Image (cartoon, helix red, strand yellow):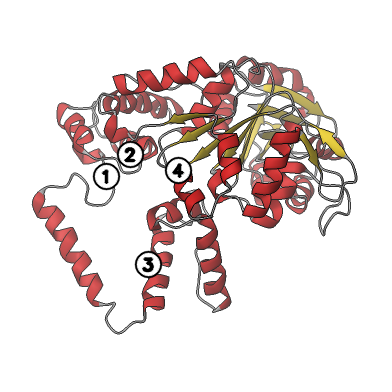
Amino acid sequence: MRLLIVGTLEGHITTAGKIALSRGAKVAQAGSIDEAMNALRTGQGADLVMIDVKLDIGSMIKRLDTERIAVPVVACGIGTDADAAVAAIKQGAKEYIPLPPDAELIAAVLEAVSEESSKIVFQDPVMDAVIALANKIAPSEASVLITGESGTGKELMANHIHKKSKRSTAQFVAVNCAAIPENLLESELFGHEKGAFTGAVARRIGKFEEANGGSLLLDEISEMHPRLQAKLLRVIQEREIDRVGGTQTIPVDVRILATSNRNLEQAVNENDFREDLFFRLNVVNVAMPPLRERPKDVLTLAKYFAKKYADSNGVDYRPFTKSAEETLKCHTWRGNVRELENTVHRSVLLAQGGEIDTDAIMLNLSEGLPADDATSVAAAAASKAETMVGKTVAEVERDLIIGTLEHCLGNRTHAANILGISIRTLRNKLKIYSEEGVSVPMPGEG
């Protein structure tokens, strides 16, 4: 976790920095917005920016957007000034932290932003072999391809491998290849020179240079365009990059970790992924098993998440009743650990009394429902199918895609996984629908 503090924080920089450091964050400080922007452009990088509320927060957020630098911003100011807090949020800040800084509040914000830990929680013997393999190859310099269904913890495993590697004291930098449009991904990876394209107002260091000496995670690499695949292959082979608009090569020392929830060998056979790049990445394959194949981990993880979200929401920890435990064990968890985590988080918020019972556990779709309820769901689906009669195949496809996207709260990656298509295909479809005047859900986290 990298924290960049901007401004003086009314003289509380030292205190805030010490709190963040005690929580495992790496802390840097910039005296002004210009200094902060220069630090972010030149490879210092940050996972969170804490900015003095007296500075022009709106200006900084606008500059971040213009230069396509994605980093959450949190405002800080003396006391609980409601007007200052509201103004900061309206300008785009994600949160307002009153000063002097409270250790628990800063810890909660850091945890909310990082959204993950390098700790892998498990008890099922199936995971023993996976962890043993990861620990064995972690100290090497070999590229690692981490595969598995969505929600199995591939990025968590990548972080674990980095923490166990010889590069653990250097940067771990992640880039989601599925979340960044193709025309921006090249700049995100390799950086750009000033004036290289519209919006390139200054030189910017890419993720390869930012991760120099450390590890670079290419998340969902299967969604990378073939043109970029060729350039990535050259970078891995030559260990040097070319910034967009640049005239000279730059040496980089980076260990590559990659993830995919698709079968890359099949993608190679379908000419959707370069075979030579696949072999370069797949020196070691760590396959993350779905949660249904590690049943002993369901309750272990559920109790872990119940404690985690009780703490983060400021409520007492409640154990699960036996009935609730059976409900969790019987569910098939198509969304894997991510679905279980979200389910437990909801149950912590909804539980009444001293235990979490079945009435607080809201499961997805019809999985695990009694036969009568499952039949009702099936009947509803049949009724829905009748409304398709008279529509063209294209219209049915459009309704299915839009409906799935709405179900995923706008999250393109989750929707594409459910639909069984690539994120690139989904984006192309949505572009066509928008041009036809169809209302398309805005991107969301899901």
Of circles 1 and 3, the one toward us is 3
Q: CA distance from mark 3 to mark 4?
A: 22 Å
Q: Is residue 277 left or right of residue 31?
A: left
Which residue bears the numbered disc 1? 363
Type of amino acid under label 3: Leu
> How many numbered circles does the render carry?
4
Q: Earlier in the sequence, mark 2 or mark 1?
A: 2
Q: Secondary structure at mark 2?
A: helix
Of circles 2 and 4, the one toward us is 4
Q: Earlier in the sequence, mark 1 or mark 3?
A: 1
Dot 2, how many residues are within 10 Å of its Cα: few (below 14), some (14-19), or many (20+)? many
Q: CA distance from mark 2 to mark 4?
A: 22 Å
Q: Earlier in the sequence, mark 2 or mark 3?
A: 2
Which residue bears the numbered disc 2? 343
Q: CA distance from mark 2 to mark 1?
A: 7 Å
Q: Say which of 263 and 2 sits in front.
A: 263
Type of amino acid under label 4: Asn
Q: Is residue 445 left or right of residue 15?
A: left
The answer to whether the residues at label 2 and label 4 have Cβ atoms under 8 Å apart is no
Q: Earlier in the sequence, mark 1 or mark 4?
A: 4
Q: Residue at x 25, y 71 (%)?
A: 384
Which residue bears the numbered disc 4? 261
